[in-house]
Image (cartoon, coloured by chain):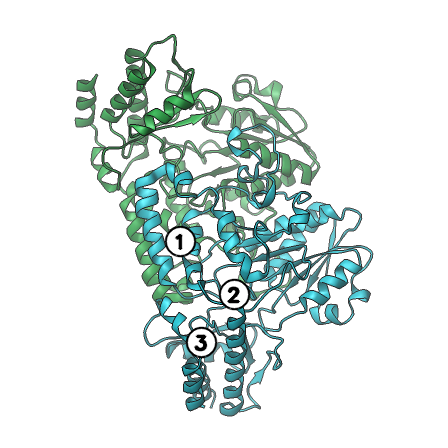
Chain colours: A cyan, B green
Amino acid sequence: LAQRAAQLDAADPLAPVRARFDLPPGTVYLDGNSLGALPSAAASRLDDVVRRQWGRGLIRSWWDHGWWEAPQRVGDRIARLVGAAAGQIVVCDSTSVNLFKVLVAARRLNPDRDEILIDATGFPTDGYMAESAARLTGASTRSVHPRRLAENPAEIIGARTAVVLVNHVDYRTGALWDMPGITEAAHAAGALVIWDVSHSVGAFPVRLDECSVDFAVGCTYKFLNGGPGSPAFLYVPRHLQADFDQPLTGWHSHHRPFDMAPHYEPAHGMARGRSGSPEMLSLLALDGALDAWNGVAIEDVRTKGVALTGFFIDCVDALLPSDQVTVVTPRDRRRGNQVSLTTPGAAAIMDAMIARAVIGDFRPPDVLRFGFAPLYIRFADAFHAAALLGDLVS
Amino acid sequence: LAQRAAQLDAADPLAPVRARFDLPPGTVYLDGNSLGALPSAAASRLDDVVRRQWGRGLIRSWWDHGWWEAPQRVGDRIARLVGAAAGQIVVCDSTSVNLFKVLVAARRLNPDRDEILIDATGFPTDGYMAESAARLTGASTRSVHPRRLAENPAEIIGARTAVVLVNHVDYRTGALWDMPGITEAAHAAGALVIWDVSHSVGAFPVRLDECSVDFAVGCTYKFLNGGPGSPAFLYVPRHLQADFDQPLTGWHSHHRPFDMAPHYEPAHGMARGRSGSPEMLSLLALDGALDAWNGVAIEDVRTKGVALTGFFIDCVDALLPSDQVTVVTPRDRRRGNQVSLTTPGAAAIMDAMIARAVIGDFRPPDVLRFGFAPLYIRFADAFHAAALLGDLVS
């Protein structure tokens, strides 16, 4: 297996991209699905933004260095990774806050229906925000497993369902859910659909336009490597923008923000998705981080991601006792760039791995989670992690 | 006047603090009330955060470098500047988003009253957010000049008023409104009060605890010099925290966020004011920026601020034709750290000043606005700006 890893790395067309990252020597970092590694361009960009644009340009940089338009400009850089035409993505606020915007807006677009349907395996914040939006708009939430949703959409999505909120990839198991199928079923039932693509953006091609997705949100600090808490993004297709009636009506979403008008009038286009002042240093660090994607085809990332996760599963099968460790990630291609294992004592095992410089993470109650970021993870890293895990388990 | 400026600078106890800032040579920067100048410590802190904490520590830095608790920790650093005991301020999101949280929470605390009263001269985003919160909670907004509110509170605040939202300092004129008086009147009438202290934090002592303020929000990129769009803060006094029922219920505000529980349970204490992942680079740049305040007494800042703005008004009186230029900022001490003038052709005059390296700003229709940040502005700067303005106007 070590030899196969070396062969796979030698043949990997993305191998040179690893040099664009500033990685700690001797560490195998398999938690890029939580916080991506540091792209060198993020650090150098931030130097320039802080010392020259802020320090020298001061207030003028809002215009001279394009700060004001940056949320839309950076959004357009993300667009190609999620299959969106330009002018449909804005980068601002957190995923949670953007979820609130689209949940309330979706409910307002479907006022005669009072149910928000959420996937039971989604990231918890999605459910919390759905509960809050439901409470404020006089709706209720219902939770259902995305497998049931994919298998029996007509039975599940009802006449009361205003909007369906689904996570594209299960954050625990890495399972990938059917975007075209669920979206089509929601539309057939008269419901809108919101996809949370936090775990799929930058992992493989997402096809928001092609799937006729109504709204999407996603985070940028995982596979996009934008840095801790880097701002999230929000997608609204062009045909819904004029009716996108979101509740966080801060002045950055105003049609004429510098008129300082007493009443709110929403901006045309994606600026409407903004709220208050964007946290510019975090946003422009992300802008720099996206340079690591220059010339990288997302299809190649998918190819390598499937190969990496598949190879890791092969290593687990070969090196770990199957009565103690279970692969809970789908073994076919229906998975994101992560492999999750369940095992007794998972928390202690992860602590021991981290102490030996192999960093993954633990999710309660018994899940070991390993992310494989194709831009900087090698097949040799996957082998090394599985071998260490084998030593620790036995 | 030039001589008096030199004498005042020589006697200024805050003069050495200017060296903590990285200012562009030859520029007089009088827009620190829009975007504060760069504290050197913000840049060096960010270097460490990016290269060592993110680059080397990776995901572990959420704990090893205290990222998770940073919103509350940085909040506690701001507390002394606004007269708040520890544990009552959290730094996260934008002022607009935090306004939404407190507006909805205030309405929920006063459910039998359905009016949100706002000050007519406040920053527009405050009114937009009040309109949105009113719409979602079945309330209405009413707008009134803060002068009327201060003079006749019992007549204005009615039996339907759930909450009063007031800007502490008028962003256009620099007028300072009566926090103790308006707060007391609101309470006497059975209403809650929210103060937006964006233009007063770091300008002079704010006494949130002493005034029994219910909620406050403020921004950190003006006199706190946190950098472009640096995160805002939110104040909830301890006695209201258990009943603080805010709508942006992201996982960072959960009682046990890492349980990944399916339903929302609010955190105890100020973590309840958080929402999604904080934009950590912007937050920690602010943390570094606050080092510029080490050992600085806010009372001294107030003393210098009144002297600086008073001296600038003296210069305007002496050097500018009174039939063309009007000082709209109060001439007594009831003002923040800014002086606003109205004059015909204000926009063109400001462009000409900026071209000559004196930076203030213009607010429609005819306001020239000059901010005086006592940490880095000298009396000589005030003289220079007034002299240039005199040349341009005549």
| Rendered-image quadrant of the N terminus of chain A | bottom left
Does A87 appear above or below B117?
A: below
Looking at the rendered structure, whether the residues under marks 3 and 2 are on a common chain is answered as yes
Q: Nearer the viewer, residue A223 or B55?
A: A223
Which of discs 1 and 2 lies nearer the camera? The answer is: 2
Marked residue chain, label 3: A
Does B218 appear above or below A217?
A: above
Residue assigned mark 2 = A202
Q: Amino acid at mark 1?
A: Leu
Residue projecting furthest to the front: A295
Residue A179: mark in rendering: none
Is residue B267 in view from this perspective?
no
Residue assigned mark 3 = A13
- Mark sitting earlier along the chain (3/2): 3
Q: Secondary structure at mark 1?
A: helix
Does A276 appear above or below A357?
A: above
Residue at screen point 53% across, 39% down: A252
Q: Position of residue B183 (x, y in %)?
A: 52, 28
Does A293 appear above or below B167?
A: below
Spatial distance from mark 1 to mark 3, Cα to Cα? 32 Å
Is residue B157 in view from this perspective?
yes
Q: Nearer the viewer, residue B168 or B386?
A: B386
Residue B281: mark in rendering: 1
Residue at screen point 61% across, 37% down: A266
Marked residue chain, label 1: B
Q: Residues within 10 Å of mark 3 (few under 14, many from 20)?
A: few
Do labels 1 and 2 touch, CB within 8 Å? Answer: no
Marked residue chain, label 2: A
Q: Amino acid at mark 2?
A: Gly
Looking at the rendered structure, whether the residues under marks 1 and 2 are on a common chain is answered as no
Spatial distance from mark 3 to mark 2, Cα to Cα? 17 Å
